[in-house]
Amino acid sequence: MDENVTSLRLRIEGFVQAVGYRHFAIGEATRLGLDGWVRNRSDGSVEALVSGTTEAVETFVAACGNGPPGSRVAHIDLEKAEPPAEKGFRRRPSV
Protein backbone atom coordinates (compact mmCIF):
# COMPACT_ATOMS: atom_id res chain seq x y z
CA MET A 1 0.00 0.00 0.00
CA ASP A 2 1.17 3.53 -0.79
CA GLU A 3 2.49 5.20 2.37
CA ASN A 4 1.24 8.57 1.12
CA VAL A 5 -2.41 7.43 1.09
CA THR A 6 -4.66 8.37 3.99
CA SER A 7 -8.20 7.09 4.56
CA LEU A 8 -10.42 8.70 7.17
CA ARG A 9 -14.02 8.52 8.32
CA LEU A 10 -15.38 11.94 9.27
CA ARG A 11 -18.43 12.66 11.41
CA ILE A 12 -19.32 16.32 10.97
CA GLU A 13 -21.57 17.80 13.63
CA GLY A 14 -23.36 21.14 13.80
CA PHE A 15 -25.84 22.77 11.43
CA VAL A 16 -24.80 20.69 8.42
CA GLN A 17 -28.02 19.37 6.86
CA ALA A 18 -30.32 21.28 4.49
CA VAL A 19 -27.48 23.69 3.63
CA GLY A 20 -25.93 21.87 0.63
CA TYR A 21 -23.22 20.26 2.75
CA ARG A 22 -23.10 16.95 0.84
CA HIS A 23 -22.98 18.77 -2.51
CA PHE A 24 -20.16 20.94 -1.14
CA ALA A 25 -18.24 17.86 0.10
CA ILE A 26 -18.62 16.09 -3.26
CA GLY A 27 -17.32 19.17 -5.06
CA GLU A 28 -14.30 19.49 -2.77
CA ALA A 29 -13.46 15.78 -2.92
CA THR A 30 -13.79 15.70 -6.71
CA ARG A 31 -11.61 18.80 -7.08
CA LEU A 32 -8.95 17.14 -4.88
CA GLY A 33 -9.14 13.77 -6.69
CA LEU A 34 -10.33 11.86 -3.61
CA ASP A 35 -12.28 8.62 -3.38
CA GLY A 36 -15.11 7.92 -0.95
CA TRP A 37 -18.65 8.96 -0.11
CA VAL A 38 -20.79 11.30 1.98
CA ARG A 39 -24.23 10.86 3.57
CA ASN A 40 -26.60 12.42 6.08
CA ARG A 41 -27.22 10.64 9.37
CA SER A 42 -30.50 10.55 11.27
CA ASP A 43 -28.91 12.36 14.25
CA GLY A 44 -28.37 15.49 12.11
CA SER A 45 -24.67 14.92 11.43
CA VAL A 46 -22.98 14.26 8.09
CA GLU A 47 -20.67 11.26 7.67
CA ALA A 48 -17.96 10.91 5.04
CA LEU A 49 -15.34 8.37 4.07
CA VAL A 50 -12.43 9.93 2.22
CA SER A 51 -9.26 8.42 0.79
CA GLY A 52 -6.37 9.86 -1.18
CA THR A 53 -3.01 11.51 -0.74
CA THR A 54 -2.40 12.70 2.80
CA GLU A 55 -2.12 16.32 1.61
CA ALA A 56 -5.44 16.16 -0.29
CA VAL A 57 -7.22 14.49 2.65
CA GLU A 58 -5.92 17.18 5.02
CA THR A 59 -7.15 19.88 2.61
CA PHE A 60 -10.57 18.18 2.46
CA VAL A 61 -10.83 17.98 6.26
CA ALA A 62 -9.95 21.69 6.53
CA ALA A 63 -12.62 22.54 3.92
CA CYS A 64 -15.17 20.45 5.82
CA GLY A 65 -14.37 22.46 8.94
CA ASN A 66 -15.47 25.60 7.09
CA GLY A 67 -18.38 24.03 5.20
CA PRO A 68 -20.58 25.71 2.63
CA PRO A 69 -22.28 29.08 3.20
CA GLY A 70 -25.11 28.68 5.70
CA SER A 71 -23.56 25.79 7.57
CA ARG A 72 -22.12 25.93 11.07
CA VAL A 73 -19.65 23.16 11.83
CA ALA A 74 -19.39 22.54 15.57
CA HIS A 75 -17.08 19.52 15.59
CA ILE A 76 -15.50 16.91 13.32
CA ASP A 77 -14.63 13.45 14.64
CA LEU A 78 -11.88 11.73 12.64
CA GLU A 79 -10.94 8.08 12.66
CA LYS A 80 -8.69 5.98 10.47
CA ALA A 81 -10.58 3.79 8.01
CA GLU A 82 -10.10 1.29 5.23
CA PRO A 83 -10.12 2.89 1.78
CA PRO A 84 -13.38 2.57 -0.18
CA ALA A 85 -13.72 -0.28 -2.66
CA GLU A 86 -14.85 2.05 -5.44
CA LYS A 87 -12.98 4.90 -7.11
CA GLY A 88 -14.59 8.32 -7.27
CA PHE A 89 -16.61 10.24 -4.69
CA ARG A 90 -20.39 9.91 -4.40
CA ARG A 91 -23.41 10.59 -2.28
CA ARG A 92 -24.77 7.62 -0.32
CA PRO A 93 -28.33 7.19 0.97
CA SER A 94 -29.01 8.68 4.40
CA VAL A 95 -28.92 6.42 7.46
Image (cartoon, rainbow, N blue to C red):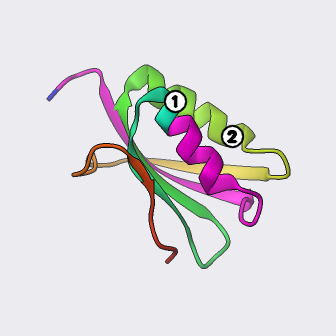
The quadrant holding residue 6 is top left
- For the residue pair 85 and 57, the one nearer the viewer reads as 85
| Stretch in magenta | 2-29
The residue that appears at 58% across and 46% down in the rendered structure is 25
Where residue 10 appears, x then y in whole percent? 51, 51
Where residue 74 appears, x then y in whole percent? 76, 52
Residue under numbered circle 2: 65
- For the residue pair 92 and 58, the one nearer the viewer reads as 92
The residue that appears at 71% across and 65% down in the rendered structure is 17
Badge 2 amino acid: Gly
Assess disc 1: are there few (<14), some (14-19) or many (≥20) residues with their C-alpha within 10 Å of its C-alpha: few
Furthest-left residue in this view: 1
Q: Earlier in the sequence, mark 1 or mark 2?
A: 1
- For the residue pair 80 and 34, the one nearer the viewer reads as 34
> Is residue 79 magenta-colored?
no
* SS at badge 1: helix
Where residue 80 appears, x then y in whole percent? 36, 45
Cα distance between the residues tagged 1 and 2: 17 Å
Q: Would you say 39 lies left or right of 83 here?
A: right
* SS at badge 2: helix
The residue that appears at 55% across and 34% down in the rendered structure is 60
Badge 1 amino acid: Arg
In the figure, 28 relative to 40: above or below?
Answer: above
Q: Would you say 92 lies left or right of 66 here?
A: left
Furthest-right residue in this view: 70
> Is residue 26 magenta-colored?
yes
Q: Would you say 13 lies left or right of 30 here?
A: right
Residue under numbered circle 1: 31
In the figure, 50 relative to 46: above or below?
Answer: above
